[in-house]
Image (tube, helix red, strand yellow):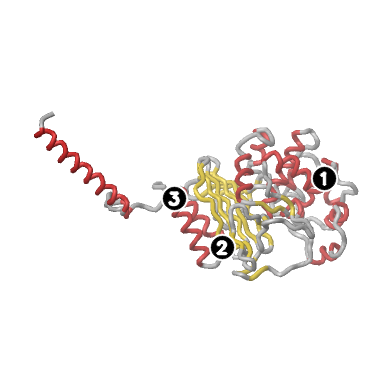
Amino acid sequence: MSRLFLRWFQRVSLGVSLFLVLALLLSACGLANPGSSGQEPSLTSRLDTLFTSEVKEKVFSGSVLITKGGSVLLRKGYNMADWTHQLPNTPTTKFRIGSLTKAFTAMAILILQERGKLHVQDRICLYVSACPFPWQPITIQQLLTHTSGMTNDLSSTDLVPLLGVPSSPERDLLILKKKGLDFPPGTQYSYSNVGYMVLGYLIEKVAQEPFALFLQQNIFAPLHLTNTGFDEKDSDVANLATGYAQWQSPIAQEPYLPIGFAAGGLYSTVDDLSRWDQALSTQQLVSQKSLEAMLTRYVSVCPTPDPCPTPFSFSEEGYGYGWFIGKEAPSARRVIWHAGVVDGFRGVLIRYPDDKVSVIVLSNLETLDYKFIPQVEKTVFATNS
C-alpha cells in the first residue's frame, strides 16, 4: 500500500469515526431525528393519561388492565388501596367486584347443565323445597336473564331477621321465599339481585356442596384464579383494598349481611379477571355451545328507544346469562359487559369480542364515573393507535 493511499485512508477513517461519534451524541440528546420530539404519545401513554386525569380529579382510585389481540396495552394501579397504611393500588390488589359475580354464577349453571344435573329450561321448583306458589312457573333461564319477576333487592325490613343470626342457605332462602313477584314470570325484564341469590342456593342444592366451594373447584382452580374468592364474615383477605365513599373517606362499617352471595359477593383482581375474560374465548370450562348460549341476547334491557340509558349509552342493549350484550354506537361494534357496584367499590369488565379488546377497571372509590369509558374506547380504537 502506498504512503499516499495510507494517509488518505487514515483521514477518511478519522472522519467516519468522528461522524459516528457525533451521530451517537445527537441521538442520545434526542436531536438526531428532529421530528422525534413531535411524535404522538404511545397508546399506552394516552390511556395512562386518561386514568391519571381521573385521579387528579379525585374521582378514581383503583387498577386497570386493557388488552388488545392478546397484548397488554395498559396494566397499572392508581392511587391508594389503603390511605391509612399508605398502600398503593397495584394490578394484584383485590377489590370487591359486586355484580361481576353474576357471570361466574351463570357459568356454574352451565357447568352443571353440561354434567346433566339440570337444564336452564327446568322450573326452579324442581330443586327448591317448599317452593312458594308464585315461583311455580319460574325457570332457571328466567332467573339468569332477569325475567323471573323477582324483586331487585331485599328491603331493610326484609333484612331485620338476618341481623345477628348465623347465616345458612336454608335460613336465607326462607327470607327470599317471603318476597312476592313484581310481575308474571317471563313477561318483562327487571334486574334482580334476589334472582341470582336464588340461583346460588339452587347450585348448592344440585351440586350438594357450598356455592363458594363449587366455584373454587370448577372455575377458580382450573383457570388459576388464585386471587378470587368470597369475603366471608370476620375473614382477613390479604391485599384487599379499603373501600372509600369519597376521596380518603372510608365507607361506614355496617353490620355484615350475606346478601351479595351469588349476586355480588366476590372479590378479585384485574389479573384474575383477565384470565377469566380469556377463558370465555376458549372451551376450558364448557363447550362452545354453552359459551354461545351464555353470550346470546335473550331479552331487551331498554323499553325506550336506543341508545339505552346505561352508563355507556350502548345501543340494542340486552341481557344474556350474567352479561349485558349490545353494540357500541355509531360503529355497531359488538360489546359484552357488566358493571359491579358495592359499598366502597366500583368495577367494570367490557369485552369487544370481534376486535379482541377487553377493558377491566376496578375501583375502591365510589365516585368512579363510567362516563369516561367512551374516552377509553375512542383511544383504543383510534386509527392511529
Circles 3 and 2: CB distance less than 8 Å?
Answer: no
For label 1, count other residues whose C-alpha is less than 10 Å away and answer few (under 14), some (14-19) or many (20+).
some
Q: Amino acid at mark 2?
A: Asn
Q: Amino acid at mark 3?
A: Leu
Q: Within the image, what quadrant is residue 174 found in?
A: bottom right
Q: Earlier in the sequence, mark 3 or mark 2?
A: 3
In this picture, residue 191 sits left or right of residue 315: right
Give me the disc on residue 327.
Answer: none
Q: Position of residue 15 (x, y in %)?
A: 18, 43
Give me the disc on residue 43.
Answer: 3
Circles 3 and 1: CB distance less than 8 Å?
Answer: no
**Foreground pick, 13 / 351:** 13
Give me the disc on residue 204.
Answer: 1
Q: Amino acid at mark 1?
A: Glu
Q: Position of residue 23 (x, y in %)?
A: 26, 47
Q: Is residue 344 above or below residue 198?
A: below
C-alpha separation, residue under disc 2 versus residue under disc 1: 39 Å
Q: Position of residue 13 (x, y in %)?
A: 19, 39
The residue at 19%/42% (across/down) is 14
